[in-house]
Amino acid sequence: MPPPLQLARFHPRLLDALHGYSRERFARDAGAGLTVGIVALPLAMAFAIASGLKPEAGIWTAIIAGFLISALGGSSVQIGGPAGAFIVIVYGIVERYGLANLLISTACAGVLLFLMGLFRLGRLVRYVPISIVVGFTNGIAVLIALSQIKDLLGLSIAKMPADFFAQLHAIGTHLGSLNPWALGLGMVCLLGVLAWPRLFADDTRLGAAMHQVLGRNAKFERRARFAGARVPGPIVALVTLTAAAWWFALPVETIGSRFGSIPQGAPAFALPEFSWETVKLLLAPTLTIALLGAIESLLCARVADQVSGLPRHDPNQELMAQGVANFVTPFFGGMPATGTIARTVTNVRSGASSPVAGIVHAATLLLVVLAAAPLALYVPLAVLAGILLFVAWNMGEWREFAHLRRYSNHYRLLMLGTFLLTVVFDLTVAMQVGLLLACGLFVRRMSGLFRVEQVERSDDAITYKLYGALFFGAVAQIDRAVQEVEAAPPGQTVVLDALQLVSLDTSGLDALRQLHKAVLQRGGTLRVESLQAQPRAVFERSGFAAELAQQRASAEI
């Protein structure tokens, strides 16, 4: 009788973190949460706008999902919220199905994520090949960068299409409407964000130049370096360039001119219209959101484990928390959420030691929205485009293209295929084809590891040795043995030495039955020797062991 199904226990990491919690730890967590909350504000608005949504959708997703993921998750320091990886997916869903169906897809994906965690499927996500992850990550980064060219150049495009080639065509046909002020703001933002961390580092040319400028006043230099390390570059760019655009009344498009005011109050709870017909229509985008959310969140949690040195995350609890967050957030007009690597690393480097930092990050965002939402109206969209280009640059693993020559053809095919499919078609197609390719290549590689060797042959017997795993992808080698038996003289005994046969499935068993049938038709006998535990269990459950025993008994008589 098979053992009963073991469900995962719902036990948030926060409960363990609060045991022995001290004021010193809270001070560190509060400081880290404040820092990450400030970092998250421009990113949340930028991700929402790039996804075809209003900026408040990203902000409230960062608040609500960020709180739930930290409070209920299985990681000590992971920060959840809207992520760049979802931009392309969300934009495509909104274009194809509409905003209401995006909310339904996100809520359904939340249910799937919770069930994945409940049924202990968290560790299976780690089996997605890294070549596929790198391929779609680089593809998403390219699409994010392309989607920001319109705002970076200040082009007068009423609605950007979702298709890659259509976007290129729209940009090319509207280059005449280029706004040099928008381009200038965006490029200053991008270059400033890239240069900011190097400006206060000791091992860079910019850091050395800063030391020469400030070196005469050591105390002032220490304060400047401390501020530079604590204040994120995107915030500096957002505040300074927004103030410059407002002060000089630059003719650039802003959040206010495109979207109007940002509500200061909490969004109202609303239920989207729901039907099973709609759910069936949205099956593909729902699966894409769920799978990408699971991969991104667990990859982020693994990175957090590596850089923090804290206890390892619980993948099943993390998926359940992601599921709750993605189920709840759409009812407040939010977008899909997952773990975010950049904000999580910032959280760790700022001194976070528990999920309390993530809760403080959500509270910080809430206070900023309630107190300063009207100021966001003056943020130029070109500045947000510069920030997102920086995100896209950091998101892509561009060195992997240069390192392709080091890897096998299988790796190259998976990575480049997933990358091109993500860019040219969409992430749903890329994930489906990529996983099918991975499975096919895995079967091909594993089938090459199985061998059937004829080690001895006499007038009355043939002995074969079996090596590896005999499964559906390797049965062709048994077929060759069947052909040899059919060509041999009648009445021979065929011996299979199965000492090195480590695994057997039903297809492999059927191939052995065909071999047995061929032996019997030639008036011979089949013997299988030295079976390991797993193949022996298959033999016994299927009745094949009894058939061989009955054959031997008949031969002896």
Image (tube, grey):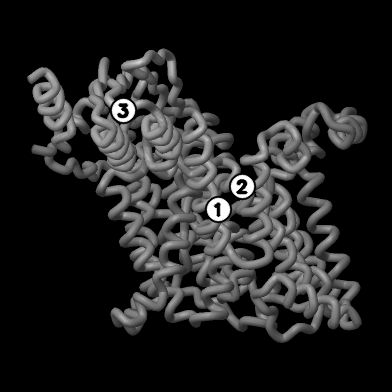
Residue under the point 46% across and 40% down:
301
Indicate the amino acid at tag 1.
Gly
Residue 270 located left or right of residue 210: left
Q: Which residue is mark 2?
A: 414
Comparing labels 3 and 1, the label whose residue is closer to the camera: 3
Q: Are marks 1 and 2 in contact (CB under 8 Å)?
A: yes
366 relative to 393, above or below = below
Residue pointed to by mark 3: 490
Name the kind of residue labelled 3 in the image.
Answer: Pro
Question: Which of the 4 image quarters holds residue 328?
Answer: bottom left
Q: Earlier in the sequence, mark 1 or mark 2?
A: 2
Q: Residues within 10 Å of mark 2 (few under 14, many from 20)?
A: many
CA gap, disc 2 and disc 3: 48 Å
For marks 2 and 3 on the same chain, the one whose residue lies earlier in the sequence: 2
- In the image shown, does 466 or 218 lie closer to the viewer? 466
Disc 1/disc 2 C-alpha distance (Å): 6 Å
Q: Earlier in the sequence, mark 3 or mark 1?
A: 1
Viewer-nearest residue: 427 or 297: 427
**Residue 389 horizontal/vertical position (percent):** 74, 58
Label 1 belongs to which residue?
434
Q: Position of residue 232 (x, y in %)?
A: 67, 47
